[in-house]
Image: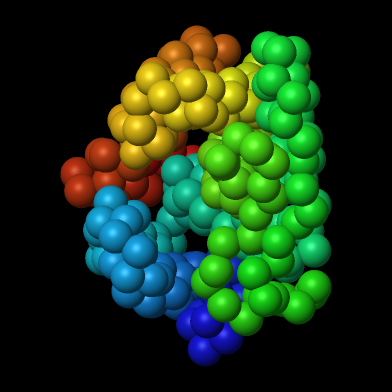
Amino acid sequence: MVYTDIFLWTGIPLLIFGYIGCWHKHEFRIAGYVLLGIFWVNQAPHFLSIGDFVNAVLCIIALPLFSYFAYQEFLSCRWEEDPELMRFLAAGIAFSMLIYYSIQRVPIAAGALTKIVTDHTNFLLNLMGYEFTVGAVDYAGNPMFYRVNNEEIGVRIINSGIRIIFACTAIQTLAPAGTLITFTGSELNRKIKSLALVLPTIYVANLLRNVMIIYLTFEGITSFHTAHNTIAKAGSMIVLIVLMLAVFEIMPEFYDNIMGIFSLPKRKKLSSGDNGEDL
């Protein structure tokens, strides 16, 4: 982990500097994308080892995808352009990864967040009539200030048969959602409105997801695998789609950015009279 984290903690600052800087910004972004792509592809063996083939494939795809973004930055450098979409991508990817891994890689922070989510989940379960209690944080053999293994940090809901782990906190959705909205070129009031809608909804929906999984499993209605990997994931996907449509309505610029990613293969050099702001 320490070896591959060199790519992580080098790539993120390079991408951020490429976003905020004015000197060789495209070169910094190119280097950042390549290093982060290498980081992600090195995570694939871990997911394969635990049978998580979906995330393993996503990690493998990340390298060619980030390399493609690096190529687009090369075109921007050669054409002396800096389109809004490329700035959006650089900032969104860099800051979402910074937020996520600043928590995920620091066990005391990951444990604290997991404990909060577990307490809130258990509160809702107790409202339903259960008498579960929350255990202590299990740091899985990690020191407090930096991870040394890939074991799951978690908190057990005693007598439920379920342990809430860091992946159940929804931070992997909250971080990119918050940063992508923040770095979309739109009026501040519309950003605030979108964030106020999206972030609390994701957090509450995740709590309800946790409660549903525990209820379905504890009551023997279905297996944990079915509740977690089928029902809960389908529900989460529906919530995200509805939220995305709502944000599209509030912030049309966000829709333009998302659709612009799919239009990158058709990108052409801007005319000399263009202001260089759009793809």
Q: Is residue 8 left or right of residue 200?
A: left
Which residue is situated farthest in the bottom direction here? 3
Residue 276 in percent (x, y) is at 46, 45
Q: Pick the residue in front: 85 or 143.
A: 143
Residue 113 in percent (x, y) is at 75, 47
Identify the residue at image location x=69%, y=41%. 158
Q: Is residue 246 left or right of residue 195?
A: left
Q: Pick the residue in front: 202 or 126.
A: 126
**Residue 46 to residue 125: above or below:** below
Q: Pick the residue in front: 144 or 180.
A: 144
**Residue 156 to residue 97: above or below:** above
Q: Is residue 33 left or right of residue 87?
A: left
Q: Pick the residue in front: 91 or 2.
A: 2
Q: Would residue 140 be seen by someone viewing this image from the given angle? A: yes
Residue 190 in percent (x, y) is at 67, 18
**Residue 106 to residue 246: above or below:** below
Q: Quadrant of residue 263?
A: top left
Residue 260 in percent (x, y) is at 34, 36
Identify the residue at image location x=52%, y=81%. 1
The quadrant in which the C terminus is found is: top left
Identify the residue at image location x=29%, y=67%. 48
